[in-house]
Amino acid sequence: MQPQTISTSVPSVRNVTGARGQPASDHFGMVATAAGVVATEFRYKRDEEIYGEDEPSDYVYQVISGAVRTYKLLSDGRRQIGAFHLKGDVFGLESGSVHRLTAEAIVDTTVRLVKRRSLEAAADTSVQVARNLWTMTARDLRHAEDHMLLLGRKTAMERVADFLLEMDRRLADVAICALPMSRRDIGDYLGLTLETVSRALSQLNDEGVLELSGARQIVLRNRQRLSALNA
């Protein structure tokens, strides 16, 4: 789904030039500022498609609030989630002319987007823009490599432990890890069934490694033990 085709039910659209007030680690914000490009914000409802597989990759996106999943439907109907994008994360930065995966809002989500052509043009004339684009691309590549290792070489418990540590690291500013994604999402990300994910979480809860305080709220009680499971 391309941004211009979003229905009128989307409640808010704002244009902002640059990305003032972004943290130093926000490479997307620094790129937008250095390039002087116009960024547009769109809001998407829960489970609403942001773009589809094989659609033109005309825009690059950043999550402002909410969460996004990118996935591919396999020939047998199964869904493989490639990544979860949380607040501040950049997605949709492709090497080719089309998107390889579909992107959907997991919950009500706001994203900032800029035209890919604008970024590419700026990178041709600015070393700073080119460097920051490379940093974002390298980060995506590292995540893809880590995910490939996780799916290919780790047991079910190791995969769940790895995921919890990843979310703990990325949601480090909150006391309770309130996950936006469902257990089915987690299973499709880890290559596990819903039942396997639920059993692993229940076992970790029984062992005191974590505490399940709600359907999607997890308190990690023993990070050292969790790290040992992921070793």
Image (tube, helix red, strand yellow):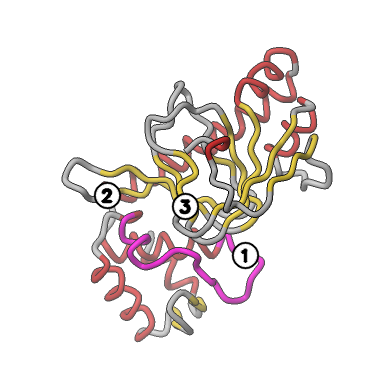
Tally the numbered discs.
Answer: 3
**Cα–Cα span, label 3 and label 1:** 27 Å
Residue 29 - label: none
Which badge, 3 or 2, is on the more N-terminal residue? 3
Tag shown at residue 48 = 3
Kindly indicate whether the residue at mark 2 contacts the one at mark 3 (C-beta within 8 angstroms). no
Residue carrying label 2? 153
Callout 2, which amino acid?
A: Arg
Q: At label 3, which amino acid type do we have?
A: Glu
Q: Which region of the structure is painted magenta?
A: 169-188
Relative to 101, is 84 on the left or the right?
A: right
Element marked by disc 3: loop
For this rendering, which residue is in front, 191 or 105? 105
Q: Nearer the viewer, mark 2 or mark 1?
A: 1
Tell me which numbered mark, 2 or 1, is placed earlier along the sequence: 2
Examine the rendered structure and indicate whether residue 38 appears above or below residue 84.
above
